[in-house]
Image (spheres, rainbow, N blue to C red):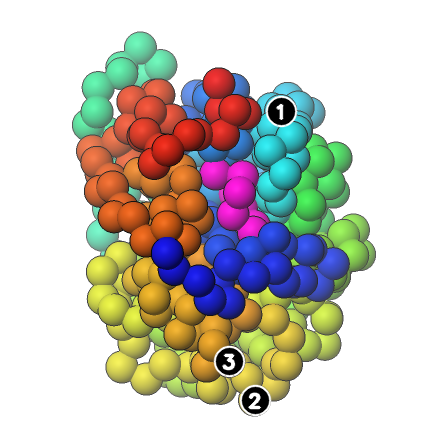
């Protein structure tokens, strides 16, 4: 048996959690080809409803920000209806779920935009390649890969549209029954592209100083909290991440500025990706949690390479209020139960991480009995 603060109840703003185990957002690409959430997704999330909080997979707020085959969106009524079935099932299982609001910015391939180039803060391409779409008939496990392209530098009207899309996404999320929203400002997507100096070389009030680079985030936060009470709004950040060609000249100062924005807005939480071991993301050479804390006294969810032991330790040491787990949730729908019981975790089959249907998605066995809601 493992005990400890990880399994104790907690409040993140207005969200009351039955434990401090958070399911990290995981893109699994099981929506329809038109980005509508499916019943299979409802089953998947309901299987994991006993964690304190589920953060949904990244969910696009605008077709211009959607560049992932079969990832969900939340800009149409049909998408809202699809999500409603997911949130209902999670709530039936006693869970809480927030919607991660997403815009991919420069990382959208033109293939998703009828050949148009994507938008970004500056005309700088992402590094590497990503999954291109394929036809509905093609059910193979291999998605074609294509390199990122140079985006079009956003004009003020593009910025205004993007901000309004986040606001609309937030409104739609409430309509879909989510308990709140998480603004995705991490992992090299649009907001992160504005935040970090390597991807933002703008000369206007959205570029240059750290305050200017954080202006877009700040305006998104303001737009979202005019639609959802701040106690139900969190933000996810990764100021030290260098994936996909990201990089910042001073991540410590950036973290402090991010903290200031969260503090001023009285957000429910900041979800910081700062891996404690390298793996999915690199363990940062200079962690910025202490810098975030200089300006932010609210709740923090930490993420990146945790297990039950390190999670308990972090919470006990006051370094986090809750811990999110990503990869461990893929093959362990009953992760909370397993961690409590000290039972070994199953290993995920990453072939099915981003593609496929039920297999490798909702068929991972539980230790003991699964939730009745899963059937
Ligand atoms: C299959 C997969 C999909 C992911 N999708 C998202 C996502 O949609 N949004 C996001 O912010 N992070 C995403 N991540 C990152 C995870 O939320 C998390 O930060 C990462 O897995 C590290 O945490 P872990 O060590 O507990 O796995 C994804 C990671 C994986 C492995």
From the viewer's perspective, is the residue at label 2 or at label 3 nearer? 3
Mark 2 vs 3, N-terminal side: 2
Quadrant location, the N terminus: bottom left
**Marked residue nearer the N-terminal end (3 or 1):** 1
Residue 294 tag number: 2
- The tally of labels here is 3
As measured in the structure, the alpha-carbon distance from the residue carrying label 1 to the one carrying label 2 is: 41 Å
Q: Which residue is mark 1?
A: 85
Percent of width and height locating residue 35 = 50, 27
Segment colored magenta: 48-56
Check disc 3 and report its element: helix, strand or loop: loop
Q: Are marks 2 and 3 in contact (CB under 8 Å)?
A: no
Q: CA distance from mark 2 to mark 3?
A: 14 Å
210 drawn magenta: no
Residue depicted at x 72% and y 71%: 266
3 vs 1, front mark: 3
Q: Nearer the viewer, residue 83 or 13?
A: 13
């Amino acid at each position: 048996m493992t005990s400890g603060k990880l399994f104790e109840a907690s409040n993140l703003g207005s969200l009351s959690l039955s434990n401090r185990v958070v399911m990290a957002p995981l893109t699994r690409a099981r929506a329809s080809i038109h980005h509508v959430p499916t019943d299979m997704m409802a089953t998947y999330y309901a299987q994991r409803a006993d964690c304190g909080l589920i953060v949904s997979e990244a969910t696009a707020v605008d077709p211009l920000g959607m560049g992932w085959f079969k990832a969900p969106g939340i800009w149409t009524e049909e998408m809202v209806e699809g999500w409603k079935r997911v949130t209902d099932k999670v709530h039936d299982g006693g869970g809480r779920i927030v919607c991660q609001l997403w815009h991919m910015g420069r990382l959208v391939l033109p293939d998703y935009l009828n050949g148009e180039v994507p938008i970004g803060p500056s005309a700088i391409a992402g590094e590497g390649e990503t999954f291109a779409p394929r036809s509905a008939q093609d059910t193979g496990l291999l998605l074609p890969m294509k390199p990122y392209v140079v985006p079009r530098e956003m004009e003020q009207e593009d910025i205004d549209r993007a901000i309004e899309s986040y606001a609309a996404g937030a409104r739609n999320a409430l309509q879909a029954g989510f308990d709140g929203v998480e603004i995705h400002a991490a992992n090299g997507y649009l907001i992160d592209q504005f935040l970090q100096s390597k991807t933002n070389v703008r000369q206007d009030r959205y570029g240059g100083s750290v305050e200017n680079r954080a202006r877009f985030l700040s305006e998104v936060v303001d737009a979202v909290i005019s639609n959802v009470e701040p106690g139900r709004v969190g933000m996810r950040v990764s100021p030290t991440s260098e994936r996909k060609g990201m990089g910042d000249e001073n991540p410590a100062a950036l973290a402090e500025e991010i903290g200031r924005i969260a503090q001023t807005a009285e957000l429910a939480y900041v979800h910081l990706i700062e891996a404690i071991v390298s793996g999915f993301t690199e363990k940062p050479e200079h962690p910025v949690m202490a810098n975030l804390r200089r300006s932010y006294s609210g709740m923090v969810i930490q993420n990146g390479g945790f297990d039950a032991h390190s999670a308990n330790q972090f919470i006990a040491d006051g370094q986090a209020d809750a811990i999110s787990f990503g990869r461990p949730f893929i093959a362990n729908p009953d992760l909370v139960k397993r961690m409590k019981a000290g039972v070994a975790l199953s290993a995920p089959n990453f072939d099915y991480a981003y593609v496929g249907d039920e297999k490798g998605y909702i068929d991972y066995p539980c230790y003991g009995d699964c939730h009745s809601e899963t059937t």
